[in-house]
Amino acid sequence: MNPEDILKNLTPEIVARFRSAIETGRWPNGDKLTAEQRNTCMEAVIVYEHHTLPPEQRTGYVPPKATPCKTDDEQPLSWQSQPEQK
């Protein structure tokens, strides 16, 4: 299904139900979502948000940092193994 087909059939109410189903793992009637249904709902919500909302209102939006990450004083991580606990 292409994005245009998805958008033709979506309303804000349907998207809200999809979001709720994704969050709870269940449809409004209590039936459990299958993995395929969950993926389809996520795809529909992403397509809908991409075409109707500004980036800062989309699910998963992370605002840019005020200042970029510094690279001058970066220190590499050193991994240490933990002793096994009994």
Image (cartoon, rainbow, N blue to C red):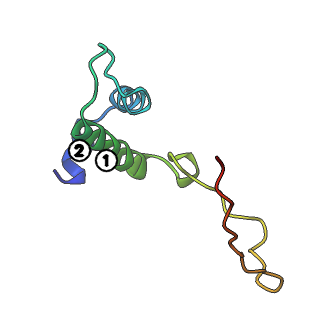
Give the answer, above or below, for where 68 lies relative to 28: below
Amino acid type, callout 1: Glu
Quarter location, residue 23: top left
Kind of residue indicated by mark 2: Ile
Whether 15 is drawn above or below 65: the answer is above
What separation in Å lies between label 1 and label 2 (alpha carbons)?
9 Å
Percent coordinates x, y for residue 42 in the rendering: 34, 43
19 or 58, nearer to the observer: 19
Q: Does 47 sit above or below residue 66?
A: above
Asked if the residues shown at circle 1 and circle 2 are in contact, with their CB atoms under 8 angstroms apart, the answer is yes
Question: In this view, which residue lies farthest toward the bottom?
Answer: 72
Q: Mark 1 Cα within 10 Å, few/some/many (few <14, many 20+)? A: some
Residue named by callout 2: 6
Closer to the chain start, of discs 1 and 2, is 2
Q: Can you tell which mark lies on residue 76? A: none
Q: Which image quadrant is residue 30 in? A: top left
Q: Residue at x 26, y 42 (%)?
A: 40
Residue hosting label 1: 43
**Residue located farthest toward the front when viewing the structure as drawn:** 86
- For the image, the number of numbered tags is 2
Quarter-wise, where is residue 79 in the image? bottom right
Give me the residue at 76% from left, 83% from top.
71
Q: Is residue 12 left or right of residue 29?
A: right
